[in-house]
Image (spheres, grey):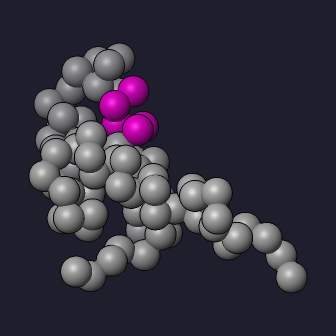
């Protein structure tokens, strides 16, 4: 399976979280459509079938997400 770059995943997760707040505030149909689009993209990018699993998988792949991940350490 192809893996999405962590920067792409971070961007998608941030967009989804922002849109979730906007939807809670005004419930606009355009916001919901964009959320659906991002949810679909996240599911494809993470190989999952629902947005909750996709968010968990995406966040798990971000730098620093796992205890053994040393990607944030500098040499």
Tell me if I can see residue 37 in this picture: no
Task: Say whether residue 33 is left or right of residue 60.
Answer: left
Q: Residue at x 26, y 67 (%)?
A: 45
Q: Residue at x 26, y 57 (%)?
A: 42
Residue 51 horizontal/vertical position (percent): 22, 44
Seen as rendered, the residue at the extreme right is: 75
Q: Name above or below for residue 8 compared with residue 11.
A: below
Q: Nearer the viewer, residue 58 or 19?
A: 58
* Quadrant in which the N terminus is drawn: bottom left
The tally of labels here is 0
Task: Say whether residue 66 is left or right of residue 75.
Answer: left
Question: Which quadrant of the structure image shows residue 47?
Answer: bottom left
Seen as rendered, the residue at the extreme top is: 25
Q: Nearer the viewer, residue 17 or 22?
A: 17
Region of the chain picked out in magenta, as a range: 17-21
Question: Which quadrant of the structure image shows residue 46?
Answer: bottom left
Seen as rendered, the residue at the extreme front is: 68
Q: Residue at x 33, y 77 (%)?
A: 3
Question: Which quadrant of the structure image shows residue 72?
Answer: bottom right
Tell me if I can see residue 25 in this picture: yes
Q: Nearer the viewer, residue 10 or 69?
A: 69
Q: Name above or below for residue 66 compared with residue 55.
A: below
Residue 17 horizontal/vertical position (percent): 41, 38
Q: Residue at x 37, y 47 (%)?
A: 56
Q: Name above or below for residue 18 compared with residue 6.
A: above
Q: Nearer the viewer, residue 41 or 56?
A: 56
Residue 39 horizontal/vertical position (percent): 22, 49
Task: Say whether residue 33 is left or right of residue 3.
Answer: left
* Quadrant in which the C terminus is drawn: bottom right
Residue 14 horizontal/vertical position (percent): 45, 48
Decide whether residue 2 is among the magenta residues: no
Magenta part, dominant SS: helix
């Amino acid at each position: 399976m192809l893996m999405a770059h962590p920067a792409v995943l971070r961007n998608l997760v941030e967009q989804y979280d922002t849109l979730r707040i906007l939807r809670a505030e005004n419930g606009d149909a355009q916001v919901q459509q964009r959320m659906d689009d991002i949810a679909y993209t996240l599911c494809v990018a993470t190989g999952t079938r629902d947005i909750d699993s996709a968010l968990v998988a995406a966040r798990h792949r971000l730098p620093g997400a796992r205890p053994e991940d040393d990607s944030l350490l500098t040499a």
